[in-house]
Image (cartoon, rainbow, N blue to C red):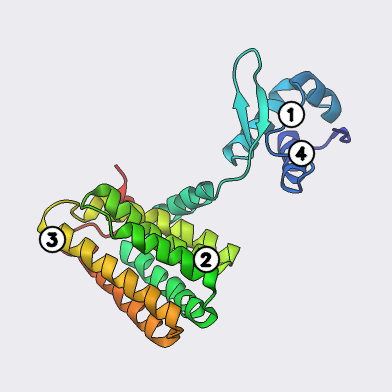
């Protein structure tokens, strides 16, 4: 690593910025151990406290993992989308956003994507969706079933191929998954009926996508999302995302 010595205010932020750019641009590969503290201090021309503050910033962004022990140090890691989802969710929680607002956003995001999938009718996408619904057919009522059925929604966005929408969807998915776990029953006849309805609807959606029935697929999915929202939120006093926090 060759970097210029920095001698400006807010040195920790400057050091973090330089290292961040090198990591994101691929100049420092994932899994690489950063040089020892003494070497980094010399290269950047900063003190140990300043360097450690910079590393804490990068660690909070999931760009490095600080390993302890004799062979410890700062190892470069791949940024995780879950980090974005977690922080975005905290912002929505802080702003008092309602759970219904999140579900409405999911309808607005997923419905056009379903229409696009049915319009494109890509064999690879259809094969993956069929594999998912085949696995769903074997589900038994319980928390694991709730999670897997919720994951079908994430698959729709992932298979659309749009990375930006995928990140937005994962942010919403993080919150919806929490709501589904906390607010809807996972056992009993009501839970089993809801699970079976979701499985049937997912299968119907895949069939419509495979047939290229874009408008019908969009209508079906919009109705399904609205029904899912009504089911999850029915009979609960929970109104905002922050209410889901333990």
Which residue is rendered at x = 86% and y = 35% of the image?
3
Which residue is rendered at x = 47% and y = 62% of the image?
169
Which residue is rendered at x = 28% and y = 54% of the image?
146
CB within 8 Å, label 3 to label 2: no
Q: What x and y, as percent, mark residue 18?
A: 78, 41
Seen as rendered, the residue at the extreme left is 189
Going from the N terminus, do you reach mark 1 or mark 3 first?
A: 1
Circle number at residue 75: none
What is the quadrant of residue 97 in the picture?
Answer: bottom left
Q: What x and y, as percent, mark residue 135?
A: 34, 57
The kind of secondary structure element at disc 3 is helix
Mark 4 or 3, which is nearer the eye? Answer: 3
Please give the residue where the numbered disc 2 appears in the rendered image: 159
Mark 2 or 4, which is nearer the eye? Answer: 2
Please give the residue where the numbered disc 1 appears in the rendered image: 34
The kind of secondary structure element at disc 2 is helix
* Separation (CA) of disc 1 from disc 3: 54 Å
Q: What x and y, as percent, mark residue 23?
A: 73, 42
* Separation (CA) of disc 1 from disc 2: 35 Å
The kind of secondary structure element at disc 4 is loop
Q: What x and y, as percent, mark residue 76?
A: 67, 35
Going from the N terminus, do you reach mark 1 or mark 4 first?
A: 4
What is the quadrant of residue 30 in the picture?
Answer: top right
CB within 8 Å, label 1 to label 4: yes
Q: Which image quadrant: the C terminus? A: top left
Q: Is residue 19 left or right of residue 85?
A: right
Q: Nearer the viewer, residue 127 or 82?
A: 127
Please give the residue where the numbered disc 4 appears in the rendered image: 28
Q: Is residue 102 above or below residue 138?
A: below
Please give the residue where the numbered disc 3 appears in the rendered image: 190
């Amino acid at each position: 690593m060759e970097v210029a010595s920095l001698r400006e205010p807010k040195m920790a932020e400057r050091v973090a910025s330089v290292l961040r750019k090198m990591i994101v641009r691929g100049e420092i590969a994932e899994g690489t151990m950063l040089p020892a503290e003494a070497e980094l201090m010399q290269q950047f021309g900063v003190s140990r406290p300043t360097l450690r503050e910079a590393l804490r910033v990068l660690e909070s962004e999931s760009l490095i993992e600080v390993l302890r022990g004799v062979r410890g140090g700062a190892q470069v890691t791949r940024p995780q989308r879950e980090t974005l989802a977690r922080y975005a969710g905290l912002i929505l929680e802080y702003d008092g956003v309602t759970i219904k607002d999140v579900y409405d956003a999911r309808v607005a995001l997923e419905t056009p994507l379903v229409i696009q999938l049915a319009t494109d009718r890509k064999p690879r996408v259809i094969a993956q969706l069929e594999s998912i619904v085949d696995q769903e057919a074997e589900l038994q009522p319980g928390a694991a079933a709730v999670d897997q059925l919720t994951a079908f929604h994430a698959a729709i966005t992932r298979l659309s191929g749009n990375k930006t929408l995928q990140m937005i969807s994962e942010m919403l998915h993080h919150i919806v998954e929490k709501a589904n776990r906390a607010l809807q029953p996972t056992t009993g006849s009501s839970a089993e009926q809801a699970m079976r309805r979701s499985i049937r609807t997912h299968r119907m959606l895949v069939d419509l996508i495979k047939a290229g029935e874009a408008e019908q697929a969009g209508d079906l999915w919009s109705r399904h999302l609205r029904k899912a929202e009504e089911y999850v939120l029915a009979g609960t006093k929970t109104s905002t995302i922050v209410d889901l926090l333990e």
